[in-house]
Image (cartoon, helix red, strand yellow):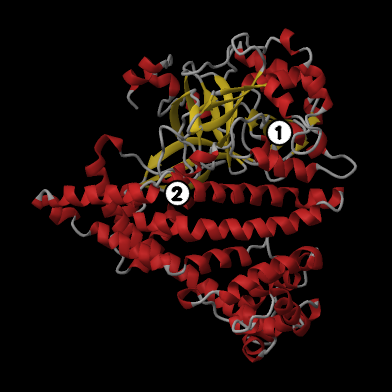
Amino acid sequence: MNWAALEARGMQLTRDEFWHPERGGVLSAAVQIGGCSASFCSPEGLVVTNHHCGFGAVNALSTPQRNLLRDGFVARTRAEELPAPGMVVFVVRRIEDVTAKVHAAQAKAKSPLELTQITDQVIRELVAEGEKAPDTTCSVAAFLEGKEYHLYHRTRLTDVRLVYAPPRAVGEYGGEVDNWEWPRHTGDFTFFRAYAAPDGSPRAHHAENVPFRPQHHLRVAAEGVRENDLVLILGYPGRTERYLSSLAVADREAIYYPKRLDLLTRIIAVLEAQAKKGDAEQLAYASAIKSLANVQKNAAGMVFGLSHNATVERKRREEAAFRAWVEGDATRAVRHGKVLDELLALDELERKTTSKDLVLGLALSPRIAPFLRGIVDLVDTAARRDAGAELDERQARAVQDPALLADFDAVQRPILEILLDELRTLDGDDAVRGRDALAPRTREASTAVVQRLLEQTKLREPAARLALLRGGKAAIDASDDPLVVLARGLAAERAELGLRMETMEGRRLDVGRRWIAAQEEWRGASFYPDANSTLRVSIANVKGYAPRDGVRYTPHTTVAGLLRKHSGNEPFDAPQALRDAAAARRTSRFFDARLGDVPVCFLADGDTTGGNSGSPVVNGKGELVGLNFDRVFEGVAGDYGWNAERSRNVCVDLRYVLWHIESVMPAPALLEELLGAAR
């Protein structure tokens, strides 16, 4: 990082205060939780992240009789904090460069497939060796298409308890209508606490556990942010693809994202219809709907952004400039002359099965189509068995699991109609094995096709599934059950997809590494590695933007704007407690005189992506001023290229969080802990 330039923008910390290789620093307070980013915000293991990051845990703790998701939750004392299902906090302790070890192993590979397999094997060995250390979990991250490999040593904290969650009407205010949009008025925050054994070592939930004492935590800022202020977004961005070819991006714009959008839109409609039947159904499907809806709108943003930002055309111009640069020097022509054409050839190969790979991924998802996934797993497992061989009890239980047929007629059947209709109409390189069971050459409605399939199969009965498993490969090969025929084909497609992906990964390790070397030389100072779920810093300023001609968005929203959106109907139904507190907000210590209101959200021009949800946003003093939770619609396609004019990340202002904790759904002990940590 250019520290002098950073100080000129408002950084007040020294380099070592921000991050030191041995002692850590402000950056060390950023952690991962539930696939999101988060941060320690007190010395007592208090963790703050987004409401949508803790949504699944709060949902799992809710019942129709005690609906924490709808009503919110406050732990008045430590004893009232609730074990949070599935929430795990990962704290980075050390980062080790293992590039030389991985490259030495890779040099022995004799084929692309072997290259992938050797890479996976050496990574497993490095992780196993690292995890010999007490209380350590490890992972290896590849940078720059395998130019570098880093081994991350983490502390894994599994005793994580819910401390505070606002009502869904606050944490998700605006719902999918406002998702990926600005102006935004969402209180997207939730607090958890990490616990450990009294000696500080990680331990599963235990009555004698105590709050974990992090080496570093973030202090809450005494003041908020103004337009143009320096802010830094700390966290674990998931994935960007900045160095893809024009052909790969064109494939995503024309095929992948439009089809993903269409299929998810129809699948979500089925789930929403079921969720509307009652409180129990709503809780059962809330997490799935929220997760899929976020991906759905992301796909819509990608379709819009890639087109309106002319990303493919920009890529083509870059490639033309790159070719000219290569051809302008004989030495460069020798080093880099073929690499772009090799990359385009790989992209063309992958493009041939884009639709099939996407539809298969959805059709074999246990969350979307559990029955079909279960049958394919059954056929795959049985085909590896000899008839009469001893039966694995776990496998026997799995094939008879009643959950395979959960809400079958109301949910699974209509989703199967959507997905099987897609599978039977795929053609050419996208055609799937087993599709004859779906009568692909007829114009029969998908409803009738699925109906016939389900009438003719015996596999809706647990006993029939168990008998097929017992019969092994001979029973699978001999079966003319149409669902078995289809599942045989889909199992073969899944296996081929896995092999194809492994082989392609090996090819890209070779071509991609040479492509990156060429890009690094060509781009110079503007070159940086793609996001890969490792700890990163995005340096930004609080800044508005112009989404279209004649429109200019300011970078702050306030409670007044929230109240103007209130309609009394979802998703704009602000709780009565919030509206009551708003009436007296001018006397609040979190009232901003410059804005004339209590702030709710703000914009920054940070470079963020999925995984940055919950990222702490800090000021130049390293103090917590907000939580990143979204991007604007016009900037969703930033995964393929950050845009100074349109790339904006959306943050909940910490003053809104504190105002809510003090005045809307009071939690005095939590407020004192946060403000005390700031002193």
Going by the numbered disc 1, the residue's amino acid type is: Gly
**Residue 574, quarter of the rendered image:** top right
Q: Which residue lies at the image location 52% right of the left edge and 22% below the top edge?
A: 618
* Mark 1 and mark 2: Cα distance apart in space: 31 Å
Q: Which residue lies at the image location 59% right of the left edge and 84% below the top edge?
A: 441
Q: Where does the N terminus fall, quadrant-wise?
A: top left
Examine the rendered structure and indicate whether residue 319 appears above or below residue 23. below
Q: Where does the C terminus fall, quadrant-wise?
A: top right
Q: Dot 2 surroundings within 10 Å: few (below 14), some, or many (20 or more)?
A: some
Q: Nearer the viewer, residue 613 or 462?
A: 613
Examine the rendered structure and indicate whether residue 630 appears above or below residue 310. above
Q: How many marks?
A: 2
Q: Which residue lies at the image location 70% right of the left edge and 36% below the top edge?
A: 172
Residue 415, horizontal then vertical, whole percent: 70, 65
Q: Is residue 516 left or right of residue 40?
A: left
Question: Taking the image as drawn, is residue 672 in sight?
Answer: yes
Question: Taking the image as drawn, is residue 131 in sight?
Answer: no
Going by the numbered disc 2, the residue's amino acid type is: Ser
Which circle's residue, 1 or 2, is located before the other in the chain?
A: 1
Residue 614, horizontal then vertical, whole percent: 59, 34
Q: Which residue lies at the image location 41% right of the left edge and 25% below the top edge?
A: 20
**Residue tagged by mark 2?**
307
Look at the numbered disc 2 and give the secondary structure of its residue: helix
Q: Nearer the viewer, residue 208 or 48?
A: 48
Q: Is residue 252 left or right of residue 56?
A: left
Q: Nearer the viewer, residue 150 or 535?
A: 535
**Residue tagged by mark 1?**
171
Look at the numbered disc 1 and give the secondary structure of its residue: helix
Examine the rendered structure and indicate whether residue 309 appears above or below residue 588. below
**Residue 664, quarter of the rendered image:** top right
